[in-house]
Amino acid sequence: MNFSIIAAVDSKRGIGIKGGLPWRLKGDMEHFREITVGQGNNGVIMGRTTWLSLPEKFRPLPERVNVVLTEQDLSLPQGVLRASSIDEAINILEAKSVSDIFVIGGGQVYAQGIVHPLCQKLYVTEIMQEFDCDTFFPKIPPEFVKTSESETITEGDIAYHFVVYEKK
């Protein structure tokens, strides 16, 4: 089953700092929810650090099947699934008959996902400024082409737009 990646990146491909997001963009959060929930019955795959960075009130992400990639003995709430690889997570989600699968971070999981043969689409919020980051999104491989781009949105003093890349 194919999957998509969804991420917000700054002008230097930064995605995080100290286990959290370097920005707070309500419009991007709404976009993330809209895309990953979709018509319902979707799955999200995330690394342990991304899981731990979610505010507790949003763990697990509602209306989605949550899979956490970890080798560690991490205590997960009932209904949250564990996998040791993207392939294992996809198999688990296929068994749950999800409609769509989204890889939602973090850096290591994005790096594995973007080169995976089943990754077909990237939903990227491109933030038009640089932030202090210690975690980065991988370079987008040339086989992904930009297929859509939203108008620029400004929230406070931060400008961004939503871009979709699809594998040719």
Image (cartoon, rainbow, N blue to C red):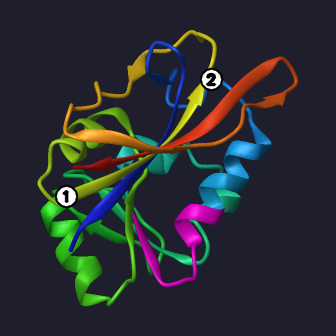
Identify the residue at horizontal 84%, vertical 30% (top origin). 155
Q: Residue 105 carries which label?
A: none
| Disc 1, SS | helix
The local secondary structure at tag 2 comes to loop
Q: Is residue 54 left or right of residue 29?
A: left
Going from the N terminus, do you reach mark 1 or mark 2 first?
2
Q: Mark 1 points at which residue?
A: 86
- The amino acid type found where label 1 is placed reads Ile
Range covered by the magenta-colored residues: 34-44
**Residue closest to the eye, 67 or 103:** 103
**Amino acid carrying mark 2 in the image:** Pro
Question: How far is the residue under mark 1 from the one under mark 2?
Answer: 26 Å
The mark found on residue 22 in the picture is 2
Report the front residue among 30 and 59.
30
Residue lying farthest right?
Answer: 156
Q: Residue at x 67, y 29 (%)?
A: 160
Residue 135 screen position, x and y as percent: 40, 22
Where residue 82 sits: x, y (%)? 28, 67
Work out which quarter of the rendered image holds the N terminus and state it.
Answer: bottom left
Q: Residue at x 84, y 17 (%)?
A: 157
Q: Is residue 37 above or below residue 40?
A: above
Q: Is residue 60 visible?
A: no
Q: Viewer-proximal residue, 110 or 61?
A: 110
- Left or right side of 25 for 146: left
